[in-house]
């Protein structure tokens, strides 16, 4: 390491801390250094070769929403030129069933800006459902609507613990509107109960129920309807990154370095140096000390508290809250990534050609019955495996991005509900991984008959177990770092005392990552809001004020 003193040192180069480092260097004018344990930067914005030579796959973050990088687009005009380019399928999400010819397709907003195509699909099952969707869609996209308020909250520091959040205020006002689809009673219902009351068509109920595991909720958890209230318009904004999500990391790193930033991989931080109540730098595992006026941690709240900070610096009430964080939700997401010879020939495409390569994600259920989700979830909670699992998300990036596979070949992924790390020992996980590929391919064949083993070149399986080995911040294989539950979201995430990124009572120490903030996923939100906290505290440039943005 060339220098041992910086204005700011950032621990970890994950999706959030990399953004904070970029803003500290480019807009804060601070000499900034990133120290990363692994061999590469970018955290969940990374990829690997495979499953066979010439193929590439996203290991973790795959789906990117339209709004994930809005401040970066505004503040760094070269972001897209340096590799952050996005593609979308005309279809958003679709669901097909093994036991019948029923299917349902929804469409990306850029392909279906008015929502009329999606409404037409819903009307095949219920005219009322089509009207309901158009009401929800209008409320989502209108000026000052749900999306605008969501973005303002996502890219702003959280409300004080005793104050309502922006989305709460908006929702309270919305529920009073005469055109509101929801009311307070519905919002308290489980997803299963609420969807039955709101939607007449079974396929749309099934499609929306599949969203709950990604929010770490079960079909009968209270407030599930609230979580799903705007899931349908939200899902109409999903994109892929050309070449894979590692292109986001490449663009961020290039911007950081061009602005004078320094980074060092394979440099693990052992402790944060704290003197007289202030963070003064870090000590590496090899004993090297790196001094800094500001320290930003990108590790999860638990490791930050108990490993990097240690005893005697944080109030015991806060320590107890950190120790009590839920981070071992019982049902995770497991998946198989397949390198294949020819694209799946979906039977549903004879009814709607959008299913043949035009759909972002396809869900496969055994039968058109919302109780199937409940039954499979219940089995997982009892520690059992479903013999015919649902495919809760099947994606095929090479249908629109041929750069990820050799010419004429394809890569496709299929995800299913799975267990967390503690559910199995290492030998059981190895057996589980083998069985999962067999089970999912069997499901696959019923909806795309050419998906036999003869069509498979090779495959890899990803589960909570792989995540726990791969990601420093995910010892339990939890892709959200800590569970996404009401007591650990928004102004309470990870705990109220640290939610605004300031690691009280230690001065000049800040935390960021997916364990903070409003939205889950691999967006730049928490990295951006962490910079906001530092800019306010240290009088740094505020590009949102300079450019007259609401956030």
Image (spheres, rainbow, N blue to C red):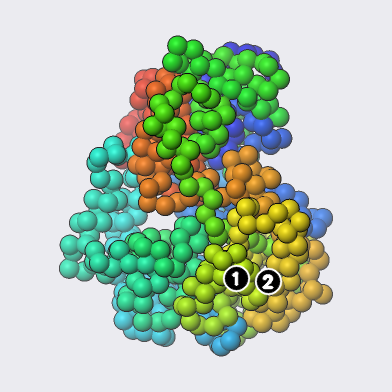
- The answer to whether residue 14 is above or below residue 55 is above
- Residue at 69 percent of width and 63 percent of height: 336
Label 1 or label 2, whichever comes before in sequence order: 1
Observer able to see residue 103: yes
Give the quadrant of the C terminus: top left
Q: Residues within 10 Å of mark 1 (few under 14, many from 20)?
A: many
Q: Which quadrant of the figure has residue 331?
A: bottom right
- Residue at 57 percent of width and 14 percent of height: 291
Q: Which quadrant of the figure has residue 152?
A: top left
Q: Is residue 492 left or right of residue 59?
A: left
Q: Is residue 472 left or right of residue 210?
A: right
- The answer to whether residue 494 is above or below residue 221 is above
Residue 413 in the image: state x and y as whole percent.
66, 64
The residue identified by callout 2 is 440
* Camera-nearest residue between 363 and 55: 363
Give the quadrant of the N terminus: top right
* Disc on res. 430: none
Label 2: which secondary element? helix
- The answer to whether residue 375 is above or below residue 525 is below
Label 1: which secondary element? strand
How many numbered marks have been drawn onto this rendered protein structure?
2
- Residue at 82 percent of width and 55 percent of height: 53
Q: Are marks 1 and 2 in contact (CB under 8 Å)?
A: yes
* Camera-nearest residue between 221 and 531: 221
Q: Is residue 393 left or right of residue 277?
A: right
Residue 216 in the image: state x and y as whole percent.
48, 57
* Disc on res. 391: 1
Observer able to see residue 74: no
- The answer to whether residue 157 is above or below residue 58 is above
Residue 272 in the image: state x and y as whole percent.
55, 21
Q: Which quadrant of the figure has residue 219?
A: bottom left
């Amino acid at each position: 390491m060339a220098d041992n003193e910086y204005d700011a040192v950032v621990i970890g180069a994950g999706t959030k801390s990399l953004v904070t480092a970029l803003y500290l260097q480019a807009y804060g004018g601070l000499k900034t250094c990133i120290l990363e344990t692994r061999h590469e930067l970018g955290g969940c914005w990374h990829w690997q070769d495979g499953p066979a030579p010439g193929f590439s796959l996203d290991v973790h973050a795959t789906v990117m929403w339209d709004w994930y990088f809005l401040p970066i687009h505004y503040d760094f005009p070269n972001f897209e030129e340096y590799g952050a380019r996005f593609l979308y399928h005309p279809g958003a999400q679709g669901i097909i069933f093994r036991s019948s010819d029923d299917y349902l397709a929804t469409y990306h907003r850029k392909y279906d800006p008015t929502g009329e195509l999606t409404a037409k699909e819903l009307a095949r099952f219920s005219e009322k459902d089509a009207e309901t969707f158009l009401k929800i869609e209008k409320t989502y996209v209108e000026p000052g609507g749900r999306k605008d308020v969501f973005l303002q909250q996502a890219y702003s520091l959280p409300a004080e613990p005793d104050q309502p959040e922006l989305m709460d205020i908006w929702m309270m006002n919305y529920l009073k509107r005469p055109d509101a689809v929801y009311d307070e009673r519905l919002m308290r219902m489980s997803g299963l109960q609420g969807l039955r009351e709101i939607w007449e068509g079974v396929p749309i109920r099934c499609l929306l129920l599949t969203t709950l595991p990604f929010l770490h909720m079960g079909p009968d958890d209270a407030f599930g309807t609230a979580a799903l209230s705007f899931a349908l318009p939200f899902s109409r904004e999903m994109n892929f990154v050309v070449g894979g999500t590692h292109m986001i990391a490449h663009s961020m790193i290039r911007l950081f370095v061009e602005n004078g930033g320094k980074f060092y991989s394979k440099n693990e931080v052992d402790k944060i140096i704290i003197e007289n109540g202030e963070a003064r730098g870090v000590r590496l595992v090899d004993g090297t000390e790196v001094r800094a006026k500001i320290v930003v941690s990108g590790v999860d709240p638990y490791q930050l508290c108990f490993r990097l900070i240690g005893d005697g610096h944080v109030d015991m009430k806060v320590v107890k809250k950190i120790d009590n964080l839920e981070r071992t939700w019982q049902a995770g997401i497991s998946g198989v990534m397949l390198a294949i010879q020819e694209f799946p020939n979906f039977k549903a495409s004879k009814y709607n050609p959008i299913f043949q390569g035009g759909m972002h994600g396809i869900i496969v259920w055994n039968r058109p019955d919302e109780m199937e989700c409940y039954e499979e979830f219940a089995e997982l909670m009892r520690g059992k495996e479903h013999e015919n699992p649902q495919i809760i998300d099947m994606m095929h990036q090479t249908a629109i991005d041929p750069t990820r596979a050799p010419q004429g070949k394809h890569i496709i992924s299929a995800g299913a509900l799975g267990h967390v790390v503690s559910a199995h020992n290492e030998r059981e996980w190895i057996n589980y991984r083998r069985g999962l590929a067999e089970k999912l391919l069997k499901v696959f064949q019923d909806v795309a008959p050419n998906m036999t083993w003869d069509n498979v070149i090779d495959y890899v399986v990803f589960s909570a177990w792989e995540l726990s080995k791969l990601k420093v911040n995910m010892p339990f294989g939890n892709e959200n770092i800590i569970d996404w539950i009401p007591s650990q979201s928004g102004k309470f995430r990870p705990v109220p005392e640290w939610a605004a990124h300031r690691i009280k009572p230690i001065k000049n120490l800040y935390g960021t990552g997916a364990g903070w903030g409003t939205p889950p996923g691999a967006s730049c939100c928490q990295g951006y809001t962490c910079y906001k906290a530092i800019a306010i505290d240290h009088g740094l440039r505020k590009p949102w004020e300079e450019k007259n943005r609401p956030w």
